[in-house]
Amino acid sequence: MAYNILLVDDSETTRAVIKRILEMVDIDVAGIFEAADGAAALRVLEANWVDIVFADLNMPGMDGIALINAMAKNRMLEVMPVVVVTSDRNPERLEGLKAIGAKAFLNKPFRPEALQRVLNEVLGTPGASQVGEVHIGESANHADGDSLRDTVRDTAVRVFEDAAFIFTDELPEGADNPLRQERKVLSAHMDVASGQARAALACSLSLAGNIAADLLGAESGSPIPTRKCIDAIGELLNMLAGMLAKQWFEHDDDRLLGLPVVATVSYLEHSQRCGVDPVRILLESEEGDVIEVSFSEAARGE
């Protein structure tokens, strides 16, 4: 049987990554529909038969929670299962969505075997082998004694490895930061735990292009539009922030994550966006590219 699939995410990068992974796993795809928010998804569902919906939660406009509620109200969930694909790791919120009718959850970032497991469970597809629960990108909780710096470093390393296949080592504290010499950097920041903190990252424009090319499956050396680089870096930060929120804060907030703000700015402007006295980590890739990751528990306004 061939399946129609709907991908609902404001990130073009995430939709492209899921499409690539769907090509790797054992499923016969008849067609793939895409929507950037819940309202667009409902229009697709009203006009087309869809066998499974992969939906993000944190989207501008009509978010994933509103979409799932609307599908439940219209009794769509009875025949169109929803898999929540999200950086949100709030167990109470996810259990609430499961009670409404969401069938499964995939935490960003995820590997092909995790998607295969979900497809097997939700659609009953006969995968080559059933795989167990797969936890991607989890690192030790700070309650186990890790310092904030260790948590930020370990989480960033795992996100870049699992999502972008970039393998990094931390540069020593006090090492020269080559991003200071760049005329412009790609800067991303977002609020974490409803404004209790701010996560940020910066990299060169050339590295951003390489990351976007890897995520989108473009050929090496292919030019990548700036908007796609911005989307890719924003999505990486979204994954990082979601994991840090789970590890460093109690899940007692109604809305844990903001939306990533990404722009091409000077390094000085980036530093001003990061928050008050952030923990700063420099990670160097095998190719010598440097990524700065920062996290502050006392974020300030723009």
Image (cartoon, helix red, strand yellow):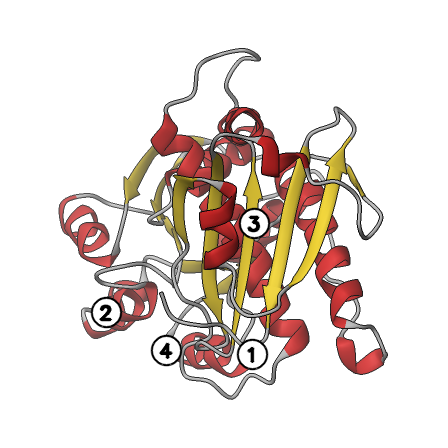
**Separation of disc 3 and disc 4 at Cα?**
35 Å
Q: Which mark is residue 91?
A: 1
Quarter-of-image position of residue 221:
top right
Q: Nearer the viewer, residue 38 or 47?
A: 38
Identify residue type, mark 4.
Ile
**Residue 143 shown left or right of residue 72 in the figure:** right
Nearest to N terminus: mark 3 or mark 2: 2
Nearest to N terminus: mark 4 or mark 2: 2
Q: Which mark is residue 100?
A: 4
Nearest to N terminus: mark 4 or mark 1: 1
Nearest to N terminus: mark 1 or mark 3: 1
Q: Residues within 10 Å of mark 1 (few under 14, many from 20)?
A: few
Q: Which mark is residue 181?
A: none
Q: Nearest to the eye among marks 3 and 4: give it.
A: 3
Q: Which mark is residue 75?
A: 2
Dot 2: element: loop
Q: Nearest to the eye among marks 3 and 2: give it.
A: 3
Cβ–Cβ under 8 Å for marks 3 and 4: no
Percent across and percent down for residue 268 are 50, 47
Q: Which mark is residue 201?
A: 3
